[in-house]
Image (tube, grey):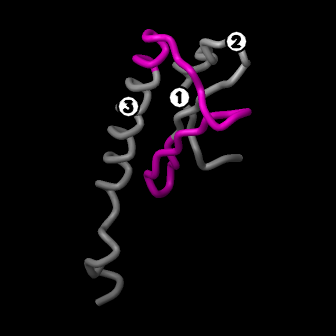
């Protein structure tokens, strides 16, 4: 099972040129990193509506990543266990 959770809101986003290219935005559930994947090629051409959907998915991922990292102590700060 992947530690990444993909945004289901992008399931229907495809390359505007008809090449079948897909985009995926996912959040790593353990460390809060955000992954942006363009599948099957190195670029994707998006319609304005699809570009909005990708932007909104990235914003949702950033919010989720902040919640994940807010619950962990920073690596540079000592934890009670390390004292």
Q: Earlier in the sequence, mark 3 or mark 2?
A: 2
Distance between mark 3 and mark 1 Cα atoms? 8 Å
Q: Which residue is at a point 72% across and 18% down the rendered structure image?
A: 19
Residue 67 at x, y percent in the picture: 32, 46
Apparent side of residue 43 relative to residue 58 in the rendered image (left or right)? right
Q: Mark 3 touching mark 1, by CB under 8 A?
A: yes
Q: Earlier in the sequence, mark 1 or mark 2?
A: 1
**Residue 35 highlighted magenta (yes or no):** yes
Relative image position of residue 29 (x, y in whole percent): 50, 48
Q: Is residue 79 left or right of 53 when viewed as pictured?
A: left
Q: Residue at x 30, y 67 (%)?
A: 73
Q: Which residue is mark 3?
A: 60
Pointers 3 and 2 in contact (C-beta within 8 Å): no
Query: Mark 2 packing: few (<14 Cα in 10 Å), some, or many (20+)?
Result: few
Estimate the x, y position of residue 56 in percent, counting from the top left.
Answer: 38, 24
58 in relation to 3, above or below: above
Specify the quadrant of the image occupied by residue 80: bottom left
Q: Quadrant of residue 60?
A: top left
- What residue does disc 2 label? 18
Point out the stretch of residues depicted in magenta: 27-53
């Amino acid at each position: 099972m992947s530690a990444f959770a993909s945004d289901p809101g992008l399931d229907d986003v495809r390359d505007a040129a008809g090449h079948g290219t897909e985009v995926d935005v996912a959040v790593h559930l353990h460390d809060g990193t955000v992954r942006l994947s363009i599948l099957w090629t190195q670029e994707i051409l998006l319609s304005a509506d699809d570009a909005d959907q990708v932007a909104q998915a990235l914003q949702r991922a950033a919010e989720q990543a902040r919640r994940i990292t807010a619950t962990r102590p920073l690596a540079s700060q000592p934890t009670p266990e390390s004292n």
